[in-house]
Amino acid sequence: DAGVIQSPRHEVTEMGQEVTLRCKPISGHNSLFWYRQTMMRGLELLIYFNNNVPIDDSGMPEDRFSAKMPNASFSTLKIQPSEPRDSAVYFCASSWGLPYNEQFFGPGTRLTVL
Amino acid sequence: TQLLEQSPQFLSIQEGENLTVYCNSSSVFSSLQWYRQEPGEGPVLLVTVVTGGEVKKLKRLTFQFGDARKDSSLHITAAQTGDTGLYLCAGNQGGKLIFGQGTELSVKP
């Protein structure tokens, strides 16, 4: 298996632009997680899906952030409009079964908002 | 305020030394995981501990879950340069994982 796939690996954009991050989870996994990692705040859970349904989005910072999972093999995290404080590494992870089971992380997308 | 406090935040040691990193909380967790993250990559699971007082060994790494399931430690014996990385603990609370801020370990030859 190829593992969790994220694209792009790096994104540099200007403040105000729309950013879309993409994730393909491991085939057969039924939970998908979006995290944000910064030096100041560490690894924060933004949202997680179970069987393609959003279960907990309490970590989503504000209305500028939205996430979708149209099918079991694809998810997007969108930021519109982006701001410099959104600069971080965004990770997607997937797991099988309960949400606190072993999570398999993708390589991350490093986002820089100028 | 971090639910899970890891200490130390940074640790730089020589190859061959022993070290311990800690993960503490005032909350009880039904299970706790340790992950290791290398630069430019996502975290990778090392171990899951479930029972209070549980000790697990993974080669030179020893993991312990506190009796009250509020804290955990990771001990590395005879550290190697390949142990360099960010070590994260993650507690299961309310059905999801809460991560600590991590301990950045650097092992110098």
Image (cartoon, grey):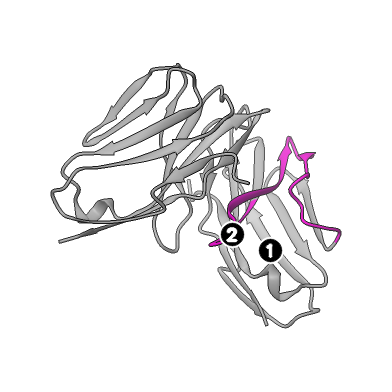
Q: Which mark is residue A6?
A: 2
Q: CA distance from mark 1 to mark 2?
A: 8 Å
Q: Position of residue B1 (x, y in %)?
A: 63, 46
| Residue plotted at (82% across, 72% down) | A81
| Residue plotted at (19% across, 43% down) | B18
From the viewer's perspective, is residue B55 above or below residue A35?
above
Proximity of marks 1 and 2: CB atoms separated by less than 8 Å: yes
Mark 1 or mark 2: whose residue is earlier in sequence: 2
Q: Position of residue B34 (x, y in %)?
A: 43, 38
Viewport quadrant of the C terminus of chain B: bottom left
| Nearer the observer, B70 or B50 | B70
Stretch of the chain drawn in magenta: A35-63
From the viewer's perspective, is residue B40 above or below residue B69?
below
| Residue plotted at (78% across, 45% down) | A57
Residue type highlighted by circle 2:
Gln
Residue carrying label 1: A21
| Residue plotted at (45% across, 44% down) | B6
Q: At numbered mark 1, what does the secondary structure look like: helix, strand or loop?
A: strand
